[in-house]
Amino acid sequence: MNAFITFIREQGIVGLAIGFIMGGAIGKVISSLVADIVQPIIGLVLGSRLGLAAMALGPIHYGSFLSNLIDFVIVAAVVFFVFRGLKLDKIDSKKP
């Protein structure tokens, strides 16, 4: 068991796991930002310059983006409180 804890401590496995979880969550937020906010704005600008109907390019879905942003905050809070609650912040510290 000591070898396992030493492995986790020296290799930074806890930090890697948290980074993986948070990376997936923030990836969803960024994808939503681009698909729901940025692309419709670009389509609106380019559509008006090209003489196309703006509504045919799609509305801005800010509700979907806000939903994904709230999901991210919830995931981040759960990871934070589990990390602190299980005292995993002490496990991943480097040796002095």
Image (spheres, rainbow, N blue to C red):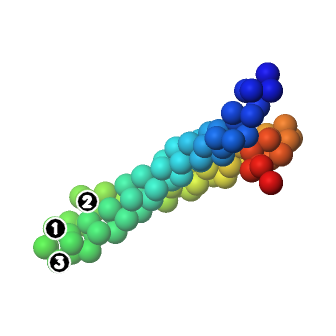
- Camera-side residue of 27 and 32: 27
Q: Amino acid at mark 3?
A: Arg
Q: Quadrant of residue 85?
A: top right
Q: Residue at x 64, y 41 (%)?
A: 11
Q: Is residue 43 above or below residue 96?
A: below
* The C terminus: image quadrant: bottom right
Q: Is residue 83 above or below residue 1?
A: below
Which residue position holds label 2?
57
Q: Residue at x 54, y 48 (%)?
A: 23
Q: Secondary structure at mark 2?
A: helix
Which residue position holds label 3?
49
Q: Residue at x 20, y 66 (%)?
A: 53
Q: Residue at x 32, y 62 (%)?
A: 39
Which residue position holds label 1?
52
Residue 64 in the figure: left or right of residue 8: left
Q: Where is residue 38 shown, x and y percent of the image? A: 37, 65
* Residue 83 visible within the image: no
- Camera-side residue of 38 and 50: 38
Q: Where is residue 5 shown, x and y percent of the image? A: 76, 31
Q: Amino acid at mark 2?
A: Leu
> Furthest residue to the left?
50
Residue 63 in the figure: left or right of residue 3: left
For marks 2 and 1 on the same chain, the one whose residue lies earlier in the sequence? 1
Q: How many marks?
A: 3
Discs 2, 1 touching: Cβ within 8 Å: yes
Q: Amino acid at mark 1?
A: Leu
Residue 29 in the figure: left or right of residue 73: left
For marks 2 and 3 on the same chain, the one whose residue lies earlier in the sequence? 3
Q: Where is residue 25 shown, x and y percent of the image? A: 55, 46
> Furthest residue to the top?
1
Discs 3, 1 touching: Cβ within 8 Å: no
